[in-house]
Image (tube, rainbow, N blue to C red):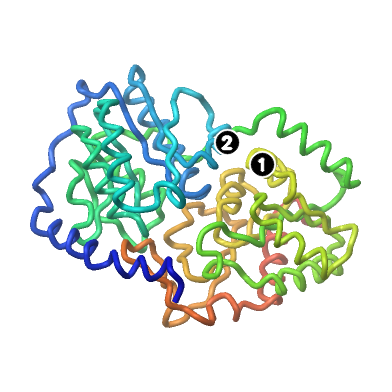
């Protein structure tokens, strides 16, 4: 058992006690939001790409409801570039590193105390899953009069507006429901993103350098995942077999995407397969560049991770490979050109964004038993449904 898991176990008694107290005082802090008192808003955006992109409609709705308010986003500095995809720029950033200098609970509390000087009137914190209780504590310590967030078995009792987090409902819909609970309307629930011009120009140059033309069939593939990759990543050897079969059947161009921390994926694949039709962009891809390459493709294939959510927001036909997570919870797109591949095992899904989740799986059967032929069948179905490939 590694040190991280041991620390998680050490915190569990405290977190359970906090939730128990929350069950006793579940409605103690509840109060109706008075819109005329809202001038400074803080939005927690501490998740990955998928988490943050599902906040775009929320941020837009809050800005429409409070056009004169100042907006601050609490974010990991590594994800700041992601907000270049947001259609508008009316917010400031405060940086918070969840996995490094601000990892310990005491440090989180001290950091939250330092934010009290900003005198925020409203906090919107959609924190759920691992860190949900700590996010609740942070929101309470910051001390805004109005605090909006999820609760689960008492964990969010410090919020003034809250709803119970559900395990069978798409997270985007729950984010919207949370805002509606506070009396704030959502005029446009769709995720809309814009891609900076410089990233569009990069993609054009990238395609040209690799001899990819408008007549080529382009697959964009993301074999990685940033958080809990063991529980969310289909085996790399399976991806390699998939590339070979795609190359044989479709003669398509395959663009491998990922962030710079996933260079090991690029190295593993390049050592085992050589083909001019398989091109990696991992070494020089920002989020904006990655988004443009996804938009340039005819089909996206990937694990349950941020790039899949970008593909769906861009209405790109997509195939998502799911292991520990539930498509019912993480996907809100009802497109006929999206297929989720998963195994219905007794133990799966095991990670449904519960507050006290500790991975206990050794063999990850939910991912390892998904065959290459199943993914190929899904590709045939998606391409067959999409008019661009008919005839």
Disc 2, SS: helix
Name which residue lies at 27% across and 55% down: 133
Disc 1, SS: loop
Identify residue for label 1: 286
Q: Position of residue 2 (x, y in %)?
A: 46, 72
In front here: 351 or 1? 1
In front here: 125 or 118? 118
Name which residue lies at 86% across and 69% down: 248
Mark 2 and mark 1 residues within 8 Å of each other at the beta carbon: yes
Name which residue lies at 45% across and 22% down: 90
Q: Quadrant of residue 226?
A: bottom right
Q: Position of residue 306 (x, y in %)?
A: 56, 51
Name which residue lies at 22% across and 41% down: 141
Q: Position of residue 25 (x, y in %)?
A: 9, 53
Is 271 situated above or below 368?
above
Disc number for residue 81: 2
In front here: 156 or 184? 156
Relative horizontal placement of residue 73, taking residue 151 as reference (left or right): right
Which quadrant does the N terminus fall into? bottom left
Mark 2 vs mark 1, CA separation in Å: 8 Å
Relative horizontal placement of residue 20, taking residue 88 as reference (left or right): left
Q: Quadrant of residue 11?
A: bottom left
For label 2, count other residues whose C-alpha is less than 10 Å away and answer few (under 14), some (14-19) or many (20+): few
Q: Position of residue 212 (x, y in %)?
A: 87, 47
Mark 2 vs mark 1: which is more N-terminal?
Answer: 2
For label 1, count other residues whose C-alpha is less than 10 Å away and answer few (under 14), some (14-19) or many (20+): some
Is 355 situated above or below 188?
below
Which quadrant does the C terminus fall into? bottom right
């Amino acid at each position: 058992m590694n040190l991280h898991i041991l620390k998680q176990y050490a915190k569990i008694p405290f977190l359970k006690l906090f939730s128990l107290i929350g069950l006793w005082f579940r409605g103690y802090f509840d109060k109706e939001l008075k819109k005329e008192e809202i001038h400074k808003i803080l939005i927690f955006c501490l998740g990955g790409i998928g988490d943050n992109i599902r906040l775009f409609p929320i941020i837009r709705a809050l800005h429409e409801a409070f056009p004169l308010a100042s907006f601050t986003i609490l974010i990991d500095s590594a994800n700041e570039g992601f907000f270049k995809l947001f259609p508008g720029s009316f917010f400031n950033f405060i940086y918070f590193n969840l996995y490094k200098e601000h990892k310990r609970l005491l440090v989180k509390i001290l950091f939250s105390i330092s934010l009290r000087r900003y005198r925020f009137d409203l906090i919107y914190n959609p924190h759920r899953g691992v860190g949900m209780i700590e996010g609740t504590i942070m929101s309470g310590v910051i001390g805004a009069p109005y605090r909006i967030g999820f609760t689960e078995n008492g964990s969010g009792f410090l919020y003034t507006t809250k709803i119970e987090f559900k395990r069978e409902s798409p997270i985007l819909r729950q984010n919207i429901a949370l805002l509606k609970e506070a009396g704030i309307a959502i005029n446009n629930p769709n995720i809309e993103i814009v891609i900076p011009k410089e990233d569009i120009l990069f993609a054009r140059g990238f395609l040209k350098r690799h001899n990819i033309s408008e007549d080529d069939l382009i697959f964009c593939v993301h074999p990685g995942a940033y958080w809990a990759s063991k529980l969310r990543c289909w085996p790399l050897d399976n991806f390699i077999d998939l590339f070979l079969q795609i190359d044989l059947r479709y003669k398509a161009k395959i663009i491998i995407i990922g962030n710079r921390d996933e260079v090991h994926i690029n190295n593993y694949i390049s050592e085992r397969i050589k083909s001019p039709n398989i091109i990696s962009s991992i070494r020089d891809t920002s989020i904006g560049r990655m988004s443009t390459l996804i938009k340039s493709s005819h089909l996206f294939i990937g694990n349950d991770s941020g790039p899949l959510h970008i593909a769906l927001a861009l209405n790109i036909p997509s195939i998502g490979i799911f292991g520990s997570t539930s498509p019912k919870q993480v996907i809100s797109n009802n497109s006929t050109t999206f297929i989720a591949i998963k195994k219905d095992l007794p133990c799966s899904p095991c990670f449904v964004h519960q507050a006290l989740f500790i991975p206990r799986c050794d063999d990850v059967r939910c991912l390892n038993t998904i065959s290459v032929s199943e993914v190929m069948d899904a590709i045939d179905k998606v391409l067959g449904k999409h008019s661009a490939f008919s005839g």
